[in-house]
Amino acid sequence: PIPRPENAELYKRYQQLADQTPGVTFVGRLGTYKYYNMDQVVGQALALYKRIEEAEHGAEAGESAQHSQSLAEQAP
């Protein structure tokens, strides 16, 4: 993308749509409408993957804890 005001505005519109859509994330040069070196792009992608993995495992752990608590409350 060429750094021009109209491109920045277009990116903001895309970002608003992505914020309203679960599971959509923009990464990399085209995804963020910014120029990055390739090492930065790879680092950004790896960091995002780590955050997604942690969120999924955290959600699974939270669900397991809630399930265990629910079972404990139901026990005589």
Image (cartoon, grey):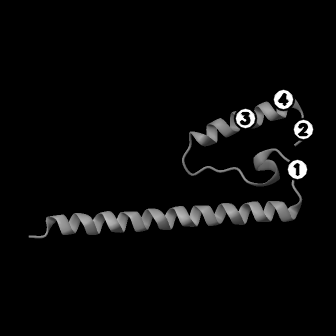
Residue shown at 65% from the left, 51% from the top: 25
Structural crowding at the residue carrying mark 1, measured as other residues with C-alpha within 10 Å and reported as few (<14), some (14–19) or many (≥20): some
Dot 3 and dot 1 residues touching (CB under 8 Å): no
Dot 1 and dot 2 residues touching (CB under 8 Å): yes
- Compared with 5, 28 (above or below) is below
The circle drawn on residue 12 is 3
Image position, residue 12 (x, y; %): 72, 35
Q: In what element is the residue under mark 1?
A: loop
- Compared with 4, 62 (above or below) is below
- Compared with 74, 30 (above or below) is above
Q: In what element is the residue under mark 3?
A: helix
Between the residue at mark 1 and the residue at mark 2, the CA separation in whole angstroms equals 9 Å
* Badge 3 or badge 2: first in the primary sequence: 2
Q: Mark 1 is on which residue type? A: Tyr
* Badge 1 or badge 2: first in the primary sequence: 2
Image-based side of 35 in relation to 52, left or right: right
Quadrant hosting residue 47 = bottom right
Residue highlighted by disc 4: 6
Residue highlighted by disc 2: 3
Residue highlighted by disc 1: 35
Structural crowding at the residue carrying mark 3, measured as other residues with C-alpha within 10 Å and reported as few (<14), some (14–19) or many (≥20): some
Between the residue at mark 1 and the residue at mark 4, the CA separation in whole angstroms equals 16 Å
